[in-house]
Amino acid sequence: MTREMDYALRVLRALYQEGQQSAAAVARRENMTKAVTLKMLKRLHGAGLVSSQRGSNGGYALSRPCEELYLSDLILALGAPLLINRCQNPDYRCENRPEGGCGLCRELSRIQEVLDGEFRKTPLSAIFQEK
């Protein structure tokens, strides 16, 4: 998982558990700098996962309920697929087996499919539950 994905999950968790709040409140709650929090809120807002409201009652809130959001949605929103190997990239051409048929690539592709399925399996609301 990338650091960006970690920050995004922490911001979404804060908004899920506490509701609408300021960037400063999210940063304090999740032990992040305000600059990193604002940057991540901007990315999540641009992806349609977070809404913002100005004014004295303003702040940031989730645009969609976490019951409808999955890790796969966040991966797509951030625009960086989580691949276990570079040969999983559709544009990759193997320098060892350019004609195809690489057993390693085939096995890693199988594992990648399982991993992708797991990213679509559990809603963020279940992940964010504190026990």
Image (tube, grey):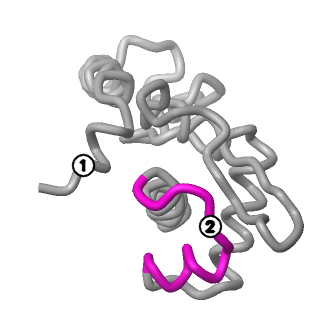
Give the image quarter of residue 22. bottom right
The stretch drawn in magenta includes residue 11: no
Residue furthest out toward the right: 55
Q: Residues within 10 Å of mark 1 (few under 14, many from 20)?
A: few
Relative to 129, residue 30 above or below: below
| Residue lying at 65% horizontally and 52% vertically, measured from the top left | 61
Report the magenta residues as a range.
17-30
- Disc 2 marks which amino acid? Gln
**x and y percentages locating residue 87 in the rendered image:** 47, 32
Tag 2, which secondary structure?
A: loop
Q: In this view, does 68 lie above or below 8?
A: above
Give, as a three-letter code, the residue at label 1.
Answer: Gln
Residue 31 sits in which quadrant? bottom left
Residue drawn at 72 percent across, 73 percent down: 38
Mark sitting on residue 112:
none
For label 2, count other residues whose C-alpha is less than 10 Å away and answer few (under 14), some (14-19) or many (20+).
some
Which mark is nearer the camera, 2 or 1?
2
The residue closer to the viewer here, 15 or 7, is 15
**Left or right: where 86 falls relative to 123:** right
Q: Give how far apart the Cα atoms at labels 2 and 1 are.
A: 19 Å
Q: Quadrant of residue 114?
A: top left
Tell me the number on the disc at residue 129: 1
Q: Which of 56 and 110 is in front in this view?
A: 56
